[in-house]
Amino acid sequence: MIPPRNPSVTRRTLLGGGLSAMALAAAGCGSAEGLTVASDGRASIRILAFRAPSLGAFLPAVIKSQGIDVAHNLRVSYAYATPDNYNTEFASGHYEVGASAALLSEALRTERGVAVSYLFNLFDYFTAVVTSDPAIRGLGDLRGHSLAAATGTTNHAMFEWFARQAGLDLYKVELLNQTTAGLSTMALMGRADATEIWEPAYSSLRHAKPGIRTLDLGLPNWQRAFGTDQMPYLGLAAHSAWARSHPDAVATLYKIYSDAATFTRREPAKAAKAIAAAIPKGKPATIQALIEDNARLRLNVRPAAQLTAGIGAVFDAGRQTGYLTKNPPAGIVYRGL
C-alpha cells in the first residue's frame, strides 16, 4: 500500500491533601468510572489502559500483584481496551483517567476540543526499525522498500520526525499498515522488508529471531534540534476538570506508580513474573531482561511539570511533521505535583 499524500492527516483521523478530603470530593462529584467511596470509607478509582502487551499495562500488573494501591489506601481497578476503544471511552469522559496516554495523542485530543491534562510521565520514547534484508543498512535505505508499521499510532508519528532527519521521505516507502499485535508476525515471517516495532514486542521479537538487525534511529538528532534529551512519551492523563477537582487522588496515583517503578527496578524478576502473566504467552525471562536494560524500556516516572522542555520538544516535532496544527493549551501540563 503506497501511503496517501498526507499520512500525518491520516494518522490524525485514525486516532480516534489527605484521602478524607479526596473522599469528600469524590462523594460530591465523579462519574460512573471515576473516583468513588465505598461504605467502609475506602476510595476506589477505575482507570482505562491499553490491553497487554502494551507499556500502559506494565505497571498496573505490578501495582495489582503487589497491592501497592491498597497500601496507599486507594483501590485502583483497571479496564483494558484496544487503542480505538480506549480513545473513544477516554475522550467521551466515560473514563476520566487514562493510563495509556501518549503525549501526542493527548495534544491532538485538545485540538478536538477535549480538555485533558498530562499528569505524569511513565515511559520515554523508544521505537526500533528491524530488518533481515542485507541491502537495508540505514533508514535512508528504506526508500523504495516496504515497511510494516502501525501507522495510526503516535509511536509512528514520532518515528516520522526521525525519518525526516535521516533524509527519508515516507512517501517513497511502501507502508504496510498493521495492528501493533500484527507487527511481530510481519517481522518474524519476513512479510515486509522492514518493520517498525517497540517494547515489549521488540524484546520478544529479538528473543524469537536473534539474527534480526536494528537500524540506527539517530537519537542524537533530538538533542541537536531541541536542546534537550528529554523525550516523554507515555503516561497518565485525566480530564482537566477531574484533575483540578481531585488533586489528592492525582498525588496518590503518582505515589502508587512511583512505588511500582521502584519495585520493578529493585525486583526485576518478581516484576517480570507479574507482567508476563498479563501478556498472552508472556515470557518472564524476556521481560526481566527488558527491565534490566532501561535504555530500551525507558521507564521514567516523573511529574509532567518537571519535563516541560521535553514536552515542548515533542509538540514541536508533532507540528513539524503535520501531526499537530498548533501548540496545545498550557493546561495540558498538570502542575499540581
Image (cartoon, rainbow, N blue to C red):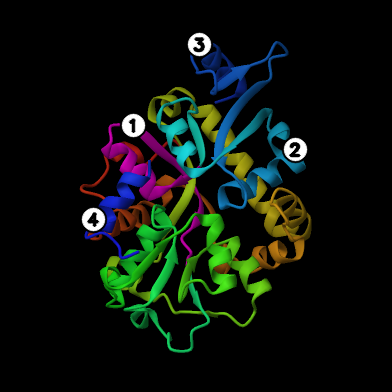
**Magenta part of the chain:** 100-127
The quadrant where residue 187 appears: bottom right
Residue of label 4: 322
Quote the CA–CA distance across marks 2 and 1.
31 Å
Please state which of the two labelled residues, at mark 3 or mark 4, is closer to the viewer: 4
Residue type pointed to by label 4: Gly
Say if mark 1 contacts mark 3, CB within 8 Å. Answer: no
In the rendered image, the vertical position of residue 226 relative to residue 218, given as above or below: above
Residue type pointed to by label 2: Gly
Quote the CA–CA distance across marks 4 and 2.
42 Å
- Residue 115: mark: 1
Please state which of the two labelled residues, at mark 2 or mark 1, is closer to the viewer: 1
Please state which of the two labelled residues, at mark 1 or mark 3, is closer to the viewer: 1
Residue of label 2: 67
In the rendered image, the vertical position of residue 264 relative to residue 296, given as above or below: above
Q: Earlier in the sequence, mark 3 or mark 4?
A: 3
Q: Residues within 10 Å of mark 3 (few under 14, many from 20)?
A: few
